[in-house]
Amino acid sequence: MFRSILCSLILVAVTACGSKRDPQIELIQDMMDQPSYKTQDFDESGKGGRSMRLPPDGSVPIGHKPYTIKDSQTAESVLKNPVQVSAESLIRGQKMYYTYCFVCHGSTGRGDGPVAEKTMAKPPSLVNARIKGWKDGGIYHLITSGRGLMGSFASQIPDEKDRWALVNFVRRLQENAE
Ligand code: HEC
């Protein structure tokens, strides 16, 4: 009992005293005090006092391929769906659809998902003749860039293959709607 109280006291003495200007006693000093800034630190030389810096213009994260296509006509003519229709890729596409699209576009793609009745503009059907007539690249472009009231899903579905698998799944919904 006495020992555990003593231990707690020592622990409090070692860890809890001191302000930032009056550093704590550091038993193991391995790189605890560093001149580097922490994420939200103040830095008077930074823009607006921020220690965080924006990445230099034109830099991209490793493994990220910037999407530069601006309109769906171009997307339809230059993009080719690299993902073969297979049980596996359809299951992947279905997972994407139920995670990201179903709430608005509905389980059959007719635009009657659970939040559709609460939105001001109804989500359109994905299984009508017009969208059936789009090339895969057009659907891919819409998912990647968004349009009007529908935002881009590029950051939620960062893997291109997942977006193409989703296109295949939308095609499957269209076949089922016939
Ligand atoms: C928050 C609701 C919402 C979600 C989630 C959503 N959409 Fe949409 N979607 C819309 C709305 C609203 C439009 C009409 C956009 C506009 O033109 O203003 C639309 C348009 C579309 C269109 C074009 C339809 C047309 O008639 O031109 C496609 C294709 C589409 N969405 C596919 C998807 C896919 C695939 C997903 C999942 C990644 C998705 N959407 C997720 C609301 C949503």
Image (spheres, helix red, strand yellow):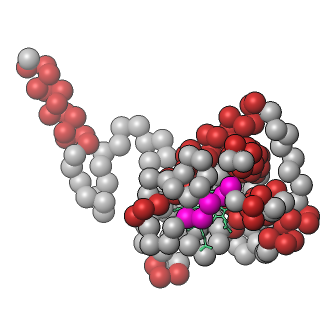
- Give percent across and percent down for residue 114: 44, 53
Q: Between residues 125 and 6, which one lies in front from this camera angle? A: 125
Q: Is residue 12 above or below residue 40?
A: above
Q: Between residues 132 and 32, which one lies in front from this camera angle? A: 132
> Is residue 67 part of the magenta span, yes or no?
no
Query: Farthest residue toward the top?
Result: 1
Main SS, magenta residues: loop
Residue 141 seen in the current view: no
Query: Farthest residue toward the front?
Result: 178
Residue 65: quarter of image: bottom right
Give the image quadrant in which the ligand numbered 1 is located.
bottom right
Query: Farthest residue toward the left?
Result: 2
Residue 80 seen in the current view: yes
- Give percent across and percent down for residue 141: 75, 64
Residue positioned 84% across, 66% down in the render: 75
Total numbered badges shown on the rendered structure: 0
Residue positioned 76% across, 72% down in the render: 58
Residue positioned 80% across, 70% down in the render: 72
Q: Could you tell me which quadrant the N terminus lies in?
A: top left
- Give percent across and percent down for residue 98: 56, 44
- Give percent across and percent down for residue 164: 77, 49
| Residue 97 located left or right of residue 159 | left
| Residue 29 located left or right of residue 110 | left
Q: Between residues 14 and 133, which one lies in front from this camera angle? A: 133
Q: Is residue 146 above or below residue 33?
A: below
Start-end of magenta stretch: 123-127
